[in-house]
Every structure is written in structure tokens, then in C-alpha cells.
Image (cartoon, rainbow, N blue to C red):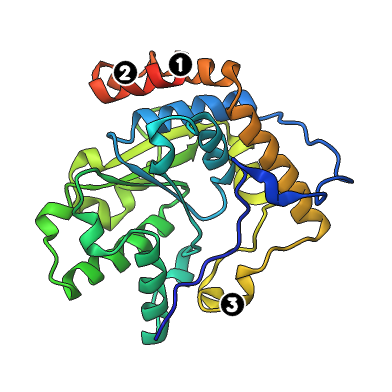
Amino acid sequence: MVEPNRPFRWDLVRPDQLGSLLDDVGEPRLFFLDDLIECAARVLAQCADGELYFVGRSVDSLFDLLSGALADTDWSTRLHSLPLSMFGGDGRDFTPDEIRQLRTNLTADGLAPADLMRGRPTVFVDLVYAGSTFGNLYAVLRRWIDDDRAQWDVIRRQLRFVGITARTKTSPNTWRWQQHAAFAAELPASAIRNVSLDGRLWSYFGDYQHKTAASFRRTRWSDPDVASPRRDQDTRFALAQAVRVVAAGRTPAVRRQLADRLTQEPTISERWLRDLQLALRR
């Protein structure tokens, strides 16, 4: 019997379990907060009133900020951290055992084919360069849907991918990852959305920021050791930063900033986003 396996992550909205873990860790400076708030607002505006899955570790800070900001709203249960690394060739040619464990893990996260037919869209959010992680995740889900004989015609209208890209000057010749991703052609045009982020911050979150857990690659999907918390210095610094991001999200000032930014989005004309904006202001 295959059991679901998941990397340990502290509950940072209610961080009582941290105890004295951070007592000797300095208070990290959130130099990226304003840009992160803008990015978070744009991701919300692009989510089509769906369930948001933050893929891998690169979007941890985005997940943490929104977890804090939406903690006292009905949206608190719509935010899901999806620990998963499927970059490039590491996300293809799985063994039967790897597929079995991956499907078990995804089922525990609410991503089995039957779950994808629910009322709200399923929205995957990640930092994107060429889109290989999205493409590999899509391929896994698509094969699974066929194996379970689920209703692809229903599910294809419910899937959405929001890529956070490094901001560049726009021109007719700008390289756009979705134009080179084969899976994008199988989905409605509205299923692919992009949110740009300052290139230096994009690189920071994707390449340099310390994380609270190791990358959850295929070699670790069935490793029970990932369920134990890490306590090394880099992890504790990452944890201290994450705690501050969640706390910032819970402040009236950040919630107000998020709500103000939402008014600039075209989708503010939709009832669900206006309701969310009002919830943030309250």
C-alpha cells in the first residue's frame, strides 16, 4: 500500500510550534515586499476564482504572503502549497513506482482527476522560464486522466497555469514561453496567464533565496525523511523570513495595499474579485 509523502512545513499562520527555534536568528529584511504584493495581486486577479496551487519552492514567499493576507477570509482554504520539482528532464520518463507514488501524493493534495472536475478551476502558479515544470505536470495529469477515463472535455476548461516571468521590455519579438509549450495548444487560450516580476527578484526567488525544505525531486517522493523538519542555519533563516512575510500579510497596511492594487486589474469588473477585495479591506 503506497502512502502519501510530503515534505514537512511549519504552519506559519499559527506558528505556535516554533518555540525557541528562531531565538538566535536575526530579523530578515523584506526588501522585496512591495514587488511581492503587486505580484500577489496580479496572480489573484488572474486566477478565475479558482483553487491556487503554488508549485515547488520558488513561489514560497508568494504563498506565505497570501496565506497571511487571506487568513481571515473564505479564501484561506483555497491556497495550497504543492511541493514538487519536475524541471526539465527530471520530470519525464518515470518508472511505474515513481508514477504510483506521484499520483498518491497528488491525490493527497486534491489533484486526482476526479478532483479536477470540481466546480472551481484548478490554478497552478510557478516561476516560469521555458515552462518545463508546467509541461511535465500537465503530461502527468493528462495521462492520469486518460487512465481513469475522466472527462477531459470538462477538465480542460478547469485547468489554468499562471506563470511568473522575469520582466523584460515588450516588443513584437518578445519571447513568450507559452508559444513554445506544446501542451498550451490543447487548452483554451484563457488557460495560460503570465505575471511579470522584476528580473532580479525573479532570480532571487528562483535561484538564491534560502528555503525551509529541500527540493522535492523524484528521488525524494517516497523518502520518509522529508517529513522531518530541518534545523540547520540556512533553514532557520528561511523560516524567520517566511514568518515575517506571513506576519506582513496579516497587517491592515498590506491587505489595504493588495486591495488597492486589485482595483487596477481588468477582472475587477467580475463579482468574485470585488468580493475578495472587500474581504481584504474588512
- Judged by depth in the image, the label closer to the viewer, 3 or 1, is 1
For residue 209, say whether it is visible.
no
Give whichever of 187, 152 is nearer the camera.
152
Residue 23 percent across, percent down from the top left: 86, 45
Are the two marked residues, 3 and 1, in contact with CB atoms closer than 8 angstroms? Answer: no
Given contact means CB atoms under 8 Å apart, are the residues at marks 3 and 2 in contact? no
- The tally of labels here is 3
- Picture coordinates of residue 48 (x, y %)? 27, 34
Q: Vertically, is 208 above or below 229? A: above
Per the image, label 1 sits on a secondary structure element best described as loop
Q: Nearer the viewer, residue 20 or 106?
A: 20
Upstream in the sequence, badge 3 or badge 2?
A: 3
* Lower sequence index among marks 3 and 1: 3
State the residue position of label 3.
224
Q: Amino acid at mark 2?
A: Arg
- Mark nearest the camera among 1 and 2 is 1
Q: Report the side of 60 relative to 141 (left or right).
A: right
Q: Which residue is mark 1?
A: 282
Amino acid type, label 3: Pro
Report if residue 269 is visible in the image: yes
Residue labelled with disc 2: 274
**Which quadrant does the N terminus fall into?**
bottom left
Please tell me which residue is depicted at 24% across the width and 43% down the height of the picture. Answer: 120
Q: Quadrant of the C terminus?
A: top left
Q: Quadrant of residue 140?
A: bottom left
| Mark 2 residue element | helix
